[in-house]
Image (cartoon, helix red, strand yellow):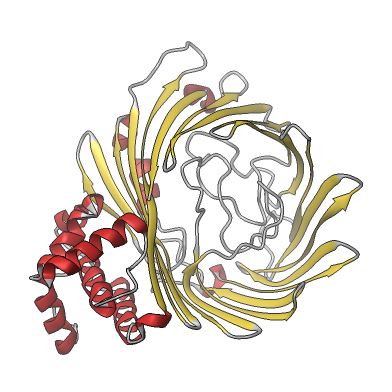
Amino acid sequence: MYTALLKKIILFFLLGRVPDEGAHWRLVWVGLVAHIRLVRWRGTSGCGGFTCRLLALCAACPLAAAHTRHYPSRAAHFVRLSYPFSLHWNCLRLLSLALCVFTASPTHAQFRAQGYLRYFPILTIDRTDLSTSPLNHTLHQRLNLSYHHRSLSIYAGQRTRLFSGPNVSNPFFKAFLETDLNGPIDASYVLLQHSNYLLHTITDRLYLDFKADNWQLSIGRQRINWGINPATNPQDLFNNYSFFDFDYQERPGADALRFQRFLSPTSRFEIALAPGRKRLSSDPGWWQPRNSVAAALYSFNISGYDLQFTAGYFRHRWHAGFGWAGALWKLGFKGEFSYFRDLEPLPALPPSNYTATISLDYGFGSGLFITLEATRNKRQNPLAGGLSPLTAIIPRRADDVAFSEWQVLAVAAYPISPVQSANFSAMWLPDERIWFAGPSYTYSVWQNIDLNFLAQLFFAPTGNLLNASGYNFALLATWSF
């Protein structure tokens, strides 16, 4: 019996699905228990007795060990000497119990696992004297789990990375990794750090999703994508991202509650609430209402244009905005506008500001696709930090979406062949007098193995700190499963 189950588990990891016949609930339970063991469950007090006995029983099961072998990069969790027995564990326990309950009917259930394993070295060249620093290496493992049972879906995403190189010794780098920007629930951990390597993991997706005929409710760590433009999004109130972070195509999520009501095939009403995380270690509790976001969105289609209006509370500021997506002659035409006003006046700062982005795109018959985007970032604080090596990968805020007051971006993508593609992006920050160029070439070696060569070239004025890491070159090798 164990041999048959083990074969089905192997098929699950190879095919990304559970076989339809036989022992469905057992596969799900054993796989999840092994996953919980990987986050360093140590059987401390506070765990329910019945659940603990089940976990202890399954921990000795050879199937759990098989699950661990098929997730070699997740085995890093075993080396964690102490794991905070907190809300993160409670979320996983509730997730496991929910899976047990809803796997009673295998016919209507579907459990999938997807992800990738990626390795890439980065070469950094000082623009001032063309000297090179030692290579930084990254081994990145991504795991996306989803479970669907009738109207209920459960999603989880884990991001684990092993870093090696000079970045490891940078105190800012570790502090940035340990700061969970997704919300008040801390699910970001540096598992190991030595002089020449650092191991980090973060749960950036973990939420329940319930769908009915014309409404949908999501609760947990999720991505709420209200942005319209391809790169700069003043309407993305909950989980904006960094354009320069090339190793994060999933983009950040947010600890939030989201309700959607579908009024017609082309219109919907939506409200979302994301509690704000505390900013200082001296602040009490894990979250602060002043840093929260609560907003509503109404979208509809008229005369071929998708329109949306947003309004709400954004980090102790009022917000109102709108966006559109449609066609202007033969060009794709998109735009976003957001207005923010302080609830309480701030010393020496104007009470309000706005951000706006407009983009045009066009596809040629040859397959070449071009996008041109312009951003007006009317900043509340003109002295806010600009682009630098330390700020490049930090996600932007909706009320400060760019590193300067004006930003112009152009992106071109061309499919050379069915297995090759080339991309080129260029950005101009006139206030900072900074130019950026980002050429990229992708080659599909096999169906699930890709090679991607890219460069990030920054051109800044003399004396700008950006010149120290002015030229970055990376070769990404990705195996997807």
In the image, 303: left or right of 67?
right
Q: Is residue 201 above or below residue 312?
A: above
Q: Nearer the viewer, residue 131 or 74?
A: 74
In the image, 435: left or right of 395?
right
The residue shown at (21%, 57%) is: 77
Q: Nearer the viewer, residue 24 or 168?
A: 24
The residue shown at (50%, 40%) is: 246
Residue 40 visible (yes or no): no
Q: Is residue 200 above or below residue 369?
A: below
In the image, 362: left or right of 390?
right
In the image, 53: left or right of 14?
left
Q: Is residue 59 above or below residue 14?
A: below
Q: Nearer the viewer, residue 312 or 249?
A: 249
- Please provide percent x and percent y for residue 410: 72, 34
Residue 362 visible (yes or no): yes
Q: Is residue 297 above or below residue 419?
A: below
